[in-house]
């Protein structure tokens, strides 16, 4: 499994805070072309993210795993989950409740 973590490194406090997480799971394919299940986890802190509550999920199939860099897999995962591309509008699961810890 590939885990993509987004961390905020504060220039003021020097505190490092994980603010987002994506999981990319190998589902098979061939040596050349991989199939992956991808999901993002709800939360804006390590404690919330560790709960593992899925916000969005999708599949990336036929990824040329040996020909292009893993960042392309991350980009395709974001597009498949509608975080990027023509449909990048915020969706209901992305919204946090008022007063929810950040």
Image: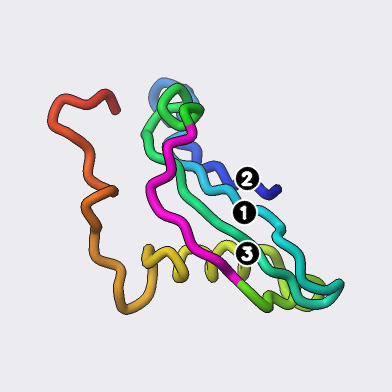
Residue 33 image-quadrant placement: bottom right
- Asked if residue 9 can be seen in this view, the reply is no
Q: Main secondary structure of the magenta part?
A: strand
Residues at circles 1 and 2 in contact by the CB criterion of under 8 Å = yes
Circle 2 residue: 3
- The numbered mark, 1 or 3, whose residue comes first in the sequence reads 1
Closer to the camera, 8 or 90?
90
Q: Are there few (<14), some (14-19), or many (20+) residues within 10 Å of tag 2?
A: few
Q: Which residue lies most toward the right here?
A: 31
Residue 46, x across and y down, in percent: 47, 26
Does the segment drawn in magenta span residue 58?
A: yes
Name the quadrant of the C terminus: top left
Describe the element under mark 1 as helix, strand or loop. strand
Give the distance between the C-alpha atoms of the residues marked 2 and 3, in whole angstroms. 12 Å
The image shows residue 51, relative to residue 68, as above or below, that is: above
Does the segment drawn in magenta span residue 73?
A: no
Residues at circles 2 and 3 in contact by the CB criterion of under 8 Å = no
Residue 37 image-quadrant placement: bottom right
Give the distance between the C-alpha atoms of the residues marked 1 and 2, in whole angstroms. 6 Å
Q: Are there few (<14), some (14-19), or many (20+) residues within 10 Å of tag 1?
A: many
Mark 2 vs mark 3, foreground winner is 2
- The numbered mark, 2 or 3, whose residue comes first in the sequence reads 2
Circle 3 residue: 71
- First to last magenta residue range: 52-60
Q: Residue at x 27, y 23 (%)?
A: 101
Residue 76, x across and y down, in percent: 54, 70
Residue 66 image-quadrant placement: bottom right
The image shows residue 57, relative to residue 13, as above or below, that is: below
Residue 48, x across and y down, in percent: 41, 27
Describe the element under mark 3 as helix, strand or loop. helix
Q: Is residue 45 left or right of residue 38?
A: left
Circle 1 residue: 24
């Amino acid at each position: 499994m590939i885990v993509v973590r987004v961390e905020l490194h504060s220039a003021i406090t020097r505190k490092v805070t994980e603010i987002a997480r994506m999981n990319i799971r190998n589902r098979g394919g061939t040596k050349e072309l991989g199939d992956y299940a991808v999901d993002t986890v709800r939360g804006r802190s390590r404690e919330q993210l560790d709960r593992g509550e899925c916000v969005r999920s999708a599949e990336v199939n036929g990824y040329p795993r040996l020909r292009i860099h893993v960042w392309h897999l991350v980009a395709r995962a974001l597009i498949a989950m509608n975080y990027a591309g023509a449909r990048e509008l915020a969706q209901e699961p992305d919204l946090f409740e008022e007063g929810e810890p950040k």
